[in-house]
Amino acid sequence: MTTELLIALLIGVVVLAGAGIGLLVSRKSRGLPPPDELDAITERTIEHPEEPEPGPVDDGLLEDDFVEIVEAPTEPETPAAPTIERPEAPQGRLMRLRARLVRSQSSLGRGLLSLLGGGDLTEDDWEELEDTLLAADVGVEPTRELVENLRNRLRVEGVSDPARAREILREELIGVVGPSLDRSLKATGDDGKPGVVLVVGVNGTGKTTTVGRLARVLVAEDKTVLLGAADTFRAAAADQLQTWGERVGVSTVRGPEGGDPASVGFDTVKQGIADGSDVVLVDTAGRLHTKAGLMDELGKVKRVIEKQAPVTEVLLVIDATTGQNGLTQARVFSEVVDVTGIVLTKLDGTAKGGIVIAVQRALGAPVKFVGLGEGADDLAPFDAEEFVDALLA
């Protein structure tokens, strides 16, 4: 028993010694200090910390000192100002008149020149000449007058040279077109008030477009312009007119849809006086000349406007392609609002250029502007000699 006990004790000592050696080796492998030093360090760190434990950063502010940071609202981007166009000078547009008319009216000129250039004219030739003029909507009375003058001059002068016959035809055509008529736009008022231009016509003649183009003509002449959208029956008409104005920096006075057009005209002229505008252009709704009620309303528009300032110009817009049908319209409008000038639109789209002569004779008012195409600056002041030269080109 004694020997067995002794062996057990020896085995226990060996096991304990091995365990101690293993512990020391493990600590050294992990770089840890001895147990007594480790206890001292732990105690010092906990009881006397040299640096604060990791945690929230203390910046010396109390909780009440914190201020909520609110980002400033981002202001919406200001839309870029619309580009203001500089319209072409009216004088430059006359250069296009001949080219545009040559393409559309040359059949009339060729017909006249071929007849006069063939030497002595027979009665059949003169009748054909008459028919050519009538087909071009020159009108019965102007045609008779023109043919009679031609016959007399050719007979008296004994003309046989085609070039001279052409010169005589040019002179006589200019004579019936009316070179001495005053075709200037009366756009100047009296007593410091603006000129007031009232634009009228039947449906579909292009009144609103004409007003927009006319504004461009006036802006090109350095005049200040105000537009009045007195066509209150179509919201699209007011929108269209406003767009035309914005393109050249011109304001538009509008009224409620379906409102009183006379009221819009009155307010437009009133604002034009207050703003010191040079010219006020008032667009009116298209109306059939056969509708008495609508024509009476147009007369009211003019009367109400003139409570603010006199109407200096009444422009009747006629579609040149309507030919003689436009003459009846013109007469009725002239009776209601005393038309002082005519605008012929779509002149580039008809071979019946004689309507210029006929409508002037019917109204006793001159053609002042002609529409030459679809462009923004395709409204040109009318010139009798340019027109005739285009016919005969």
Image (tube, rainbow, N blue to C red):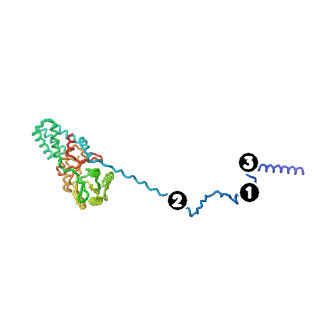
Identify the residue at horizontal 90%, vertical 51% (top origin).
2
Residue 340: image location, x then y, percent? 20, 53
Residue 260 can be seen in this image? no
Question: Of label 2 and label 1, which has the lower sequence position?
Answer: 1
Residue at the spot of label 1? 40
For disc 3, the neighbor class at 10 Å (few under 14, some 14 to 19, many from 20) is few
Give the numbered dot on residue 69. 2
For disc 2, the neighbor class at 10 Å (few under 14, some 14 to 19, many from 20) is few
The answer to whether the residue labelled 2 contacts the one labelled 1, judged by CB atoms less than 8 Å apart, is no
Mark 3: secondary structure: helix
Question: Of label 1 and label 3, which has the lower sequence position?
Answer: 3
What amino acid is at disc 1?
Ala
Would residue 285 appear left or right of 149 to someone viewing this image? right
Residue 297: image location, x then y, percent? 23, 59
Mark 2: secondary structure: loop
Residue 41: image location, x then y, percent? 72, 56
Residue at the outermost left position: 156
Front-most of 190 and 263? 190
Residue at the spot of label 3? 29
Front-most of 217 and 321? 217
Q: CA distance from mark 1 to mark 3?
A: 20 Å
Residue at the outermost bottom position: 64
What amino acid is at disc 3?
Ser
The answer to whether the residue labelled 3 contacts the one labelled 2, judged by CB atoms less than 8 Å apart, is no
Mark 1: secondary structure: helix
What amino acid is at disc 2?
Ile
